């Protein structure tokens, strides 16, 4: 695939980036926050699966402890700001990661 771009078009793009650098930085920061939050949430769901010994929605008749949704948590990363992630929980509140 060939992309033809003129010098004037490149100059215009650079001008837009220069004048909107703050909003561009905010978009990147927001994307990093979301990615880090998702990255932390996934292993916790897997840990709860291992703790309960079964997959989501899988039931064992004599077992009374089940998944019980998620609790939201936040922490601050330097230069990134606040990151939100979901902490998996069980009905009996016995699971800790």
Image: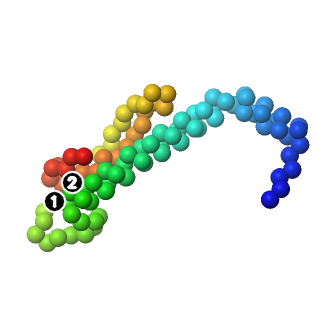
Q: Residue at left 28%, top 65%?
A: 55
Looking at the image, is mark 1 or mark 2 earlier in the sequence? 1
Q: Residue at left 57%, top 33%?
A: 26
Can the viewer see residue 67 in this picture?
Answer: no
- Toward which corner of the image does residue 17 lie, by quadrant? top right
Can the viewer see residue 51 in this picture?
Answer: yes
Q: How many discs mark residues in the rendered view? A: 2
Q: Between 69 and 43, which is closer to the camera in this rendering?
A: 43
Marker disc for residue 90: 2
Q: Is residue 64 depicted above or below 9 in this figure?
A: below
Q: Please, which colouring scheme is shown? A: rainbow
Q: Is residue 64 depicted above or below 77 in this figure?
A: below
In the picture, measured across the screen, residue 8 lies left or right of residue 80, that is right
Marker disc for residue 65: 1
In the picture, measured across the screen, residue 39 lies left or right of residue 64, that is right
The reply to whether the C-beta atoms of the residues labelled 1 and 2 are less than 8 Å apart is yes
Secondary element under disc 1, as helix, strand or loop, is loop
Q: Between 17 and 69, which is closer to the camera in this rendering?
A: 17
């Amino acid at each position: 695939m060939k992309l033809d771009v003129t010098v004037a078009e490149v100059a215009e793009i650079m001008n837009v980036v220069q004048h909107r650098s703050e909003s561009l930085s905010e978009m990147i920061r927001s994307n990093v926050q979301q990615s880090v939050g998702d990255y932390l949430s996934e292993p916790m769901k897997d840990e709860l699966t291992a703790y309960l010994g079964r997959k989501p929605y899988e039931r064992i008749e004599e077992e009374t402890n089940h998944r019980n949704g998620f609790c939201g948590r936040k922490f601050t990363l330097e230069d990134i700001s606040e990151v939100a992630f979901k902490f998996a929980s069980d009905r009996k509140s016995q699971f800790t990661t």
